[in-house]
Each structure stands twice: as C-alpha cells, then as structure tokens.
Amino acid sequence: MTPTPDVFDSEHEQVVFCHDEPSGLKAIIAVHSTALGPALGGTRFYPYADTADAVTDVLNLSRGMSYKAALAGLDLGGGKAVIIGDPNTLKSEALLRAYGRFVESLNGRYYTACDVGTFSVDMDEIARECSYVTGRTVAHGGAGDSSVLTAYGVFQGMRAAAEATWGEPTLGGRTVGIAGVGKVGHHLARRLVEDGASVVVTDVWQPAIDRIRDELPAVTVVESTEALVASALDVYAPCALGGAITDAVVDVLSATVICGAANNQLAHPGIEKALADRGILYAPDYCVNAGGLIQVADELEGFVFDRAQQRASGIFDTTRAVFETARTDGVPPAIAADRLAERRMRDVGRLRGLWLS
C-alpha cells in the first residue's frame, strides 16, 4: 500500500476524514483555500484502491478548485470531497444523508456539488441533512446537470485556442478527438459537430458509445484512447479522469491543441514544457472547464440559466488572456494560468483581511 500523503505538507486549510460505519460511508473533505470565499467543489464517488490514492486525489482536486474559481472571477474558494467505494453498489439514502451531516458540520466553509459518480438527485438527498449543497435538481430549485455548461465552457476555450493557433475562433474543418463521452464529452461532441468539426471519440463505457452513435451518427468511434491519440487530430480533448497527458502521449500526439474537460490533465510537473517544445498549445484544464462551477455557483443567487451561460461565455476571453500572458511572460499557458489565479487570490483575498463592522 502506498503511504498516505502528509496533509500537513500541503497548503490546504483543512482536511476532514468522515466515517459512518453503519451506512458504509468513508469520505474525505479537503478545503484548500477560503481566501476569496467559502470553498465550493463537487463530491467524487469512486472505488479508490486505497486511502492514499483518495487523499492524493482530493488534495489535487481541491487545489484545482481554488485556482478554477479564482480564474473564473468567482468570490469562492476551493474544496473537494471524495467518497471511497463503488457508487453502483454502495450508494444509498443513508450513506448520502450521513455524508450531508458531515458537510453540515463545517458550517458553510465548504459547499458540495456533483462530480464523477454523483448526480443532482444525490445532491437532493444530501440536502435533506445539509444547507450547503448546490447542483440540485430543477424540481428542488437547482441548476440540474452542470455538465451542460461545463461542455459549453470547454467549447469556448477551444474556440480561443483555435483562434490563437489558426487565426479564427472556430473548429469548422478541424478534427477533434474526445476521450470520454459521458456527461460532458457528449455535450461537447454535439457542439463541435454543430460547429462543423469532424469528431472522433472513444470511451471505456459501451452505453456512452451506443448513445453517441445513436444521436450523432457523423461521429467516428475508435476502440481505445491509445488509438485515438495515435489518430490524425488537430485538437485532443481529454474528458475522462485526470493524468491523461503523459510523456508517452506527448511523444505520439499529432494534435496542435489540447483542450478538454478532465481535471488535472498533466501527469507530472514538466509536461507543460514538453508540450510547448513540441509546439502543442495547451488550454489549462481548470480554465476551460469552469463552466460547471459557474453554473452551480449561480444557484447561490437563485439559478438563472441565461445568466450562468453568459458568465460561462467569459471563458473565451479568460482563455485568451491566459494565452496572452503566456506569450508576454514567455511561459507555458499552464504557468500563465496559475499566475493569473494566484494574483487574484492574493490581491482580492487581501481585502478579506480589512476589518468591516
């Protein structure tokens, strides 16, 4: 078993382990930063191999949420939660409500929402024990499926990358490969087809492939991510789990642009330089996939889809700004995005230290 990471070596404000034996709940909530406001981030329900893997994931994901919220211009911090186990066999009303009690115990420092393995109906169950829940069903006053605006934001980021690479903010006539056509990848594929792109997809879950074949017959399906990466692509869009951009992928990838919805796409530090050396433009994941966060954050004001979509449209300009900062500073876009997010957390977060009666 891999040793559990030492959370005191991270910059996180708070990490909470949650255990309710009768319901089978084993969860971890990580609050990375509340410099800009309460932490907001989804709950991932996943069968981790061990606790160490779960801790590593929740620390990385929560840090990414801080940067995502800052770069998106939201007055929110970053947090994330993971529930350890197979959601297909372990998820129950009792488990979700027990988890809601743990979230409630943080008194608003952390707001939860959907992520891999959790859905809006699950948020409704959690909300029976907790006031700090977003991403709820429309029937309960929520925004519903946040994958709609996540995909919309990725599409806006991809348009900005296309403009930076080929001079026009369109994917018309380009070939885009999508790895993972679940909730977000499916919506992204539809937008790309409508924009005139040729779309190639893969997914390990056969029902997702069957659905996209039925609804988007123009899409080409390949058998594996390895086959997709080896294809002739203009854009590669990782839309499944993180760590998709490895040294092996960089070596064989023909795409000129990487822009996808997956979190924590870069497998290790230094990959961003390898991409730049190969002339591949990387649109930082937490910059372009912020549409879902923007959508669930809008619920805190009383959800209005048009308002949330207008805010998500700003991802185009934000991605442009990242590319411009990268150019002027002479750094890869991943580093430029970090600098912009850290600047906002520092400059705006400092104001929270000014006492107000």
Image (cartoon, rainbow, N blue to C red):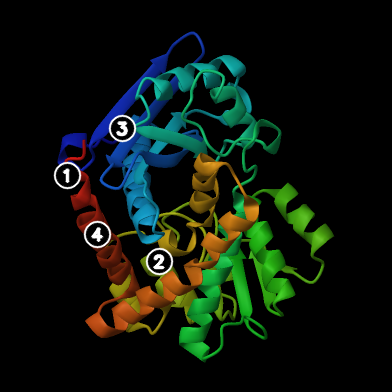
Amino acid type, callout 4? Glu
Q: Which mark is residue 284?
A: 2
**In the displayed structure, does residue 295 sit left or right of residue 305?**
left
What residue is shown with label 4?
342
Determine the image quadrant of residue 277. Answer: bottom left
Q: Nearer the viewer, mark 4 or mark 1?
A: 1
Check disc 1 and report its element: helix, strand or loop: helix
Single out the residue that lies furthest toward the bottom.
167
Amino acid type, callout 2? Pro
Q: Is residue 49 visible?
A: no
Q: Between 197 and 207, which is closer to the camera in this rendering?
A: 197
**In the displayed structure, does residue 209 sit left or right of residue 330?**
right
Q: x and y percent of residue 225 in the render?
A: 57, 62
Q: Nearer the viewer, mark 3 or mark 4?
A: 4
Residue shown at the point (60%, 65%) measured from the top left:
178
Q: x and y percent of residue 52 in the render?
A: 32, 34
Amino acid type, callout 3? Met
Amino acid type, callout 1? Gly
Dots 1, 3 in contact, CB < 8 A: no
Q: Nearer the viewer, mark 2 or mark 1?
A: 1
Q: Between 331 and 318, which is closer to the camera in this rendering?
A: 318
User: Between marks 4 and 2, how big is the CA–CA gap?
Assistant: 14 Å
What residue is shown with label 1?
353
Mark found first going from the N terminus, 2 or 1 = 2
